[in-house]
Amino acid sequence: MQLETALLIGVMFTVATYLVLQRSFVKILFGFLILTNAANFVVLAMSGRPDGKVAPVVLDPQSPMVDPLPQALILTAIVIGFGVAAYLVFLLYRLFLDQKTTNAAELYDEKESG
Amino acid sequence: MNWPLAPILLPLLTALVTLFWGRSSLPRRWFVAVSATMQLVVALHLTADTVLGRTFVLGLGAWPAQFGIVLVVDLLSAIMLSLSALITLASVLYGYAETSVRLEHPLRATLTQFLVMGINLTFCTGDLFNLFVAFEIMLIASYALLTLEADDWDIKHAFPYVAINLFGSALFISACGLAYKLFGTLNFAEISLRAALLTGDFRLHLLALVLIVVFGIKAGLFPLYYWLPNSYPTLPIPTSALFAGMLTKVGVYVLLRMFATVLPHELTFAHTLLAWLAGATMVLAVMGAISRNFIRGILSFHILSQIGFMVLAIGFFTPLSLAACVFYIVHHIVVKSSLFLIGGVALRLNGTDDLDRMGNLWKHTPWLGLLFLFQALSLAGIPPLSGFWGKYLIVVVGLQEREYWLVGASILASILTLFSMLKIWNGAFWTVSNSVPLRTGDRRWVGMTTVVAGLTVVSLVIGFGAEGVLRIAMQAAERLCDQQGYAREVLAYLGKAGGNLSP
């Protein structure tokens, strides 16, 4: 499980970096969404191997539990990430309304903006 | 004692009340001003108490410190809280002098208070994850402030700021994960005890490097600062002064806290890296400042150059250099904010802050010129003003450590700072030209200048009372480095259960 998780996180970070560096606003947006989730996965992976452990709800005090703290942490991080994503959508939309473009390269073209 | 909660609760309540108060009006303004004053009083009270050797520890939810969320206010936190309250008060009052009630954006006060809440939580927090949350509160408020009153040209510069901070946040949460795996806890006090056992483990160095990137973005260290000089000048003047004074210094504070209190002191590689990055920041940023030709642009680059000095002091990592860093932060926050505010007054008077089209200010408003002269020379480090003492100590430590290149870089940066301050002086104050309009008929500048004068007095007191301030800075640095003492104070908090954990 650990190796697969590590690979998944690696792939997600790679894809996110690739998308963030693209010109299209939509791709940039998706890049940041994936980036946030990749970071959340890193934290989740820190609770260790889940094999043979039960969910962190105490029903049977004898069986080992998965470490609940990383899950609590990413719950907070997901909520924050959601808020920031909503903000980012609006920022990109406003950029589109003001500048009439969805291309980041055009947006920062020095010659055009003067 | 519940005092550590007050610096967070007061801005939160103020923000909520102003949110529902709606349109800006005179009573609403009074309410915010009174709240800002109260925050300053509370912060000064905390400083006065902590300077006597106390450390406030408050467990939220009354769990023992290892398990719950703790707020810790030691001397450095209290100093930072006072500075943030002071700058907020100045920014609020300046905003009142600048904008009439009718034109004020109603959300500016609300968002500013949320921003202050995030900043104060950063200073008070005692664990890494709560620090992340505090950063996010601060960042989201700052995103909103950056775009609140932006026009279609300004808004373009908000995007790089948001983008790089989103990247920083993702890295920060990953760093939290790494730290949790490594130490099994996120509490600063516990980490400091457990990290001492891991010295030499390469994962610890890895974590230190990730943290340098995360907080380096926030502080504006060398390869990571390009977002700052374009985004800050687009803000309204009072907000830009608050940002310039506080936001990057939050990054410096966290670097101080991490490297002195939380991580072991033997991370020599990370310290050396910090010192050299700081050297590069100082020189390159001051060159950026010289290349700019409008006041707020020049000042924005100077923030970065000064960050270099503070981080250089952290990089040297001796007790004296950490004290110098604390002193420098105190000096810099006051001076930098007041310079931004002076730039704002000059902008009002001349109608522009493009140095080619400014002038006549010295002839008609000598008081403003005098204030600028004090603060600009202080920034460059002319004795006996406040900037000199911090720089002097950093250079002394550099010579003791035989880092001659870095000392040379810092002196070069100071000289170039003086040069670019003179550029503003010549352009805006000294030039006499008939083609430049001077709007002294608009009496708003008098109130704005009065606020700046208040900040200048504070900065002069720091300069002339350098010995006393330095003694406090020494004490703050000493307690910052005392990991054992910090852990003892924090872990002594047992909560309501009295340390009894079994249900």
Image (cartoon, coloured by chain):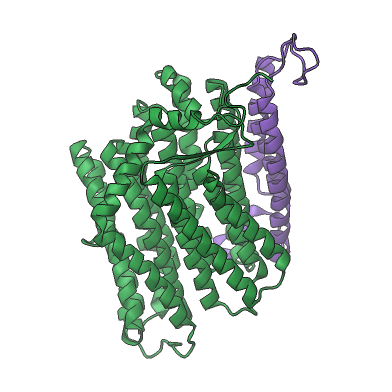
The foreground one among B241 and B27 is B27
Q: Is residue B104 visible?
A: no
Rendered purple, the chain in question is A
Q: Is residue A101 visible?
A: yes
- Quarter of the image where one finds residue B317: top left
Identify the residue shown where x is 41% and y is 71%. B452
Residue B452's place in the image compared with B231, above or below, is: below
Q: Position of residue B373 (x, y in %)?
A: 29, 71
Identify the residue shown where x is 35% and y is 87%. B364
Residue A100's place in the image compared with B258, above or below, is: below
Q: Is residue A6 left or right of residue B456?
A: right
Q: Position of residue B472 (x, y in %)?
A: 31, 48
The foreground one among B362 and B93 is B93
Identify the residue shown where x is 43% and y is 87%. B438
Identify the residue shown where x is 59% and y is 67%. B32
Q: Position of residue B413 (x, y in %)?
A: 29, 54
- Quarter of the image where one finds residue B201: top left
Q: Colour of chain B?
A: green
Residue B364's place in the image compared with A15, above or below, is: below
The foreground one among B140 and B491 is B491
Q: Position of residue B268 (x, y in %)?
A: 34, 28
